[in-house]
Amino acid sequence: MAQGEVLRSVKCLPRIVFVIPLGRTLTTANLAAPFIETHVKEPPLLEINFGAWEGATREDITQTITGRVQESD
C-alpha cells in the first residue's frame, strides 16, 4: 500500500488510470487517485512470470548464469 500513498502525494491530477486486471492494482489505483472513477483494465499490461528468476536481482541472475556456464565447461 505504500506505493499508493506515495502516488497520492504527487501533485498531478490524472483523469484516467490504466491498470492490469488484478485486484491489487485496483487497490493501488484507488489509494493513489481515489477521486478517479475511470479505471481502464488493460490485459496486455499483465505481468510476466520469470519463474526461478522471479524477484531476483540482475546480479543474482548473472551469478546463476555464470555458474552454469562454468559448470558446463
Image: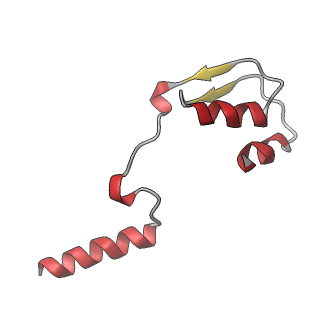
**Which of the image's four quarters has the C terminus?**
bottom left
The image shows residue 48, relative to residue 71, as above or below, that is above
Q: Position of residue 19 (x, y in %)?
A: 60, 30
Q: Nearer the viewer, residue 40 or 12?
A: 40
The image shows residue 63, relative to residue 28, as above or below, that is below
Count of marks placed on residues: 0
Q: Position of residue 13 (x, y in %)?
A: 83, 31
Q: Nearer the viewer, residue 43 or 31?
A: 31
Question: In the visual, does 64 lie left or right of 2?
Answer: left
Question: In the visual, does 36 lie left or right of 72?
Answer: right
Q: Position of residue 11 (x, y in %)?
A: 88, 40
User: In which image quadrant can residue 32 be found?
Assistant: top right
User: In which image quadrant can residue 33 be found?
Assistant: top right
Question: In the visual, does 28 lie left or right of 6?
Answer: left
User: In which image quadrant can residue 65 be found?
Assistant: bottom left
Query: Residue at the spot x=36%, y=72% of the render?
Result: 62
Q: Nearer the viewer, residue 45 or 1?
A: 1
Query: Residue at the spot x=69%, y=37% of the render?
Result: 28
Q: Position of residue 14 (x, y in %)?
A: 78, 28
Question: In the visual, does 18 lie left or right of 55?
Answer: right
The image shows residue 10, relative to residue 29, as above or below, that is below
Residue that lies at the very extreme toward the top in this rendered image? 38
Query: Residue at the spot x=57%, y=22% of the render?
Result: 41
